[in-house]
Amino acid sequence: MSLELPEDFSRKLEEAVDVLSSATRVKVVSHYDGDGLCAAGILAKALHRKGLSFQVCTTRALDEAFIGALEGDEDVILIADMGSNSLPALEKLSAKVIVLDHHEPRGDSEKIVHINSHLHGIDGTKGACAATLSFTLATVMDEENWDLAGIALAGAVADRQHPGGLEGLNRSIAKEASEKVGMRVDRTHTLLGDTLAEALSLSINPYVVGISGNMGGAGTFLSDLGISPDMRVEELEGESKIKLISAMSLKLLEQGVTAEDVKGAIEEGYWDASRGTYANWTAAYVNACGRLGMDGVGVAICLGDPSALEEGKRLRKEFLGQVLVGLKKVEDEGAFERNHTQFFYVENPSFAGTIGGVAMRYLLNPDLATVALSVLTEKTRISGRATKDLVGKGVNLAEAFKESAEVLGGSGGGHSIAAGASIPKGKEEKFLEYVDNTIEVQLEG
Ligand SMILES: [Mn+2]
């Protein structure tokens, strides 16, 4: 018994397995973010188990230059978390190309084995990510790969597809994995760290003013509740746990956070029995690796390397430390507001998406889309986040970013709720104006 999938989706996966079974050398290309690295780890493990010769590489962007450089000895190129918007360029490669993507595709291809959740009625913002698509392919290759279900869901968590509960393919995997490999879906708090004070001070989901990024503040908050700041996180149980979560929720309400995000202090947890850890924790470590440019460590964690896991724990603290500095700046200085958007600047573009998403939920105006800009040497990288509410009213950030960036000679895309763009430096003002106007049109439509 395997996953029940739409017939056209199953056919595509079979086609990909056929291509892989006759491959001599495979190149796996994936995105550097948490989901992309989990996808790479799953594909690497599955290819290794098949005894295939392969190489893994990760990238920030799948641009023309990068695609050109893919031409090599490999006869199969397997691209995850990207590719659906680069099909014409990928068609020029001499190798057989397989694409596993969950971003809204611009088209389809005859020549490429193009697997995109959107083409099979599965929403790529909530119902499927690159890691769950890669995992699905891996299970079609071999049932043995079901033990990688925790890595698949770590990808979904890294892409933040889980708040409010899993849907679509993600949910089917969790359900089936509970029978096959003992996965357990429960509810857990989001605190992760050695001591409670440390875990609270590193917390960004939720971001609690006066506590997040503030070890002293976190310690006082705990002491005032009669809980020892030095208590180990795993010892937090019973009454202390209820007391702490209630007090945090109260602080979030005072902070003006929406009821839905207040609930975010408790989230769905996916216990990965094959590894003895929560997929949510794996996601946190792997995500940090990618954000700090240590992509290889992230993939190694997915492959089960214990020393990589230790390194991932250290990198998570470093990553959050930097993200919290950016968030404190937003907390102190706020954002610039336009009619439908609010924007601010972030130095490091690798942190912009995280800072934008957290700032929108816990610090800024929830009625406006959030745009974080990073001005680099030649171009400006932009990351945007919308709320579910805005998307429900017609906002599609991917389209707004794509259209606005292309007019200015840049590029953009992503999802309706989270998008990215790259534009020539100096065109920021124009871009912000176009995005604001486009959203206005979307809201009227
Ligand atoms: Mn992804």
Image: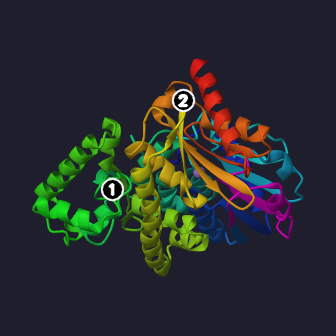
Type of amino acid under label 1: Thr
Q: Nearer the viewer, mark 2 or mark 1?
A: 2
Give the camera-side residue of 308 and 401.
401
- Determine the residue positioned at 31% across, 53% down: 209
Q: Which residues are magenta?
A: 58-84
**Label 1 packing within 10 angstroms: few (<14), some (14-19), many (20+):** some
- The image shows a total of numbered marks equal to 2
- Determine the residue positioned at 50% across, 77% down: 308
Spatial CA distance of label 2 from label 1 is: 34 Å
Lower sequence index among marks 2 and 1: 1
Residue 262 position within the rendered picture, expressed as x and y whole percent measured from the top left: 30, 43
Q: Eyeballing the image, is 123 above or below 248?
A: above
Give the camera-side residue of 432 and 95.
432
380 vs 386, left or right, is: right
Residue beneath disc 1: 190
390 vs 65, left or right, is: left
Determine if the magenta segment contains residue 172.
no
- Determine the residue positioned at 33% across, 40% down: 257
Residue 145 position within the rendered picture, expressed as x and y whole percent measured from the top left: 54, 61
Residue beneath disc 2: 339
Residue at the farthest bottom position: 307
Residue 176 appears in view: no
Q: Secondary structure at mark 2?
A: loop
Determine if the magenta segment contains residue 83.
yes
Q: Secondary structure at mark 1?
A: loop
| Quadrant where the C terminus is found in the figure | top right
